[in-house]
Amino acid sequence: MLTGLFNYWVVIILMMAGLYVVMASRHLVKKIVGLNIFQTAVFILFISMGKVGGGTAPILVEGTTLYSNPLPHVLILTAIVVGVATTALGLAIAVRVYEAYDSVDEEDIAAMDTEDRRQESAVTTVTNTPS
Amino acid sequence: MSAVLMMGFFSLLCSCIFMVLDAVDVAFTEAAVGAGASTIFFLAAIAIVGRTSKPSKPGKTFIPLIACIATGTLLFYASFDMPYFGKADAPIHQHVAPRYLQESAGEVGPPNVVTSVLASYRGYDTFGEVGVVFTAFIGVLLLLGAGTRRTGVERPAPPNVNEESMRQKVVLREVADLVIAPVLIFALYVQWHGDFGPGGGFQAGVIFASAIILYALIYGIVPAQQLLPPRKLAYLPGVGLLLYAGVGVYSMLRGGNFLDYDMVASNPLDGQHYGILIIELGVGITVASVMINIFFSLSERSL
């Protein structure tokens, strides 16, 4: 009965989709979107592991004895809010990068950095020659 | 742009999945965060950095693709060792979870076990999480400023074209007017009812913040900042965190351990009740004010 592992497979596919976006996309904001997808895959992993077949939500009521595991719920609900705060931090960094480079394209930024370094070394060689 | 909107739908779908998997509190949080806060943050960011992106060079996507397929295959192989979905005898259900489910009604009180675990059994964890939210807020503040630039004396004539046009859209404005006040009241309900039903400080904070963000989107950022001056709002995350820590210190002064609510009142169950209410309030204040502040900081930059 391999269908019992279906939840893990969904998580793996989502996780790899997120990882692919992080690695392959050039746009910094899209990379953060990829990170978010990856993060959500982890959330689904935790929550699906906490599910007990036939159980209900972990709010105690008379006459019910089978509940899903509350611990992953606690971990993930705080992780979601922490996740949005850290996402905002990532976006803030992207905004500052844009203000400094006028671009959020990874390769353009790398090209500008190489150009800067080349010019700097040119300047230092020029100033070094007279002395 | 479309990627960000897809993200919003994706997280709404996820919250439905969480609902089906019995995680009502998590579904609640994901719906509020995904549809409310994070989508707006992304939109504010791409309003600044531009929505177009160059396509990746064909050669550059090859290595990531191979890496992802390889990692995915390995994880797929590893998944065969995992316990089947929904099995009650899986290792995850054997350790501390039975105690939480059986004893929490007598030891802590609230029928919502998630709240008892979050606020009482694992109060240190939650304190750490609130600390992380606070730290991320400090980071955004350092990077972008507190959103106070336009409340100063020399206010330049803002290019308020978008804000003006928003306010003139009758349907949007009327619906927002209708919705904002109930959403704020609902946030307070979620805050104080978290012991008994799904809810608590985290969800309430995000819901409260999304109502304020909706107000700012429709009526413009300036009226919203007059309502909640960013300079004063920037103190609130610290107030919330200190309220949380204060409960811990108070329980130490009463002779218990840090965050041991049994000592907060003469009767342990009453103590747990007061302790949870106060720390949830601290969490709610911190989360709501952090979200509103981040929104102000990000949207300031795009004007």
Image (tube, coloured by chain):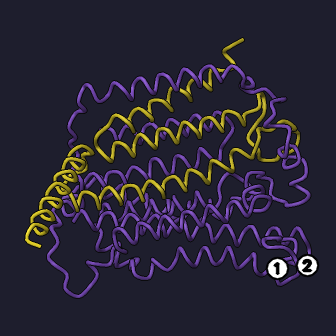
Q: In which quarter of the view is residue B19 placed?
A: top right
Q: Which residue carries the number 2 mark? A: B266
Q: Residue furthest front?
A: A131
Q: In which quarter of the view is residue A61 placed?
A: top right
Amino acid found under the numbered disc labelled 2: Ser
Q: Which residue carries the number 1 mark? A: B252
Q: Nearer the viewer, residue B170 or B203?
A: B203
Judge depth for marks 2 and 1 and give the one in front. 1
Secondary structure category for the residue under label 1: helix
Picture coordinates of residue B254 (x, y %)? 86, 82
User: Mark 2 to mark 1: distance in Å?
Assistant: 14 Å
Measuring 55% from the left and 56% from the top, which residue is drawn there? A82
Q: Residues within 10 Å of mark 2 (few under 14, many from 20)?
A: few
Measuring 31% from the left and 74% from the top, which residue is drawn there? B223
* Label 1 chain ID: B
Measuring 90% from the left and 70% from the top, which residue is drawn there? B268
Q: Say if B223 sits above or below B36 in the image.
A: below
The mark found on residue B163 in the picture is none
The answer to whether residue A107 is left or right of residue A85 is left
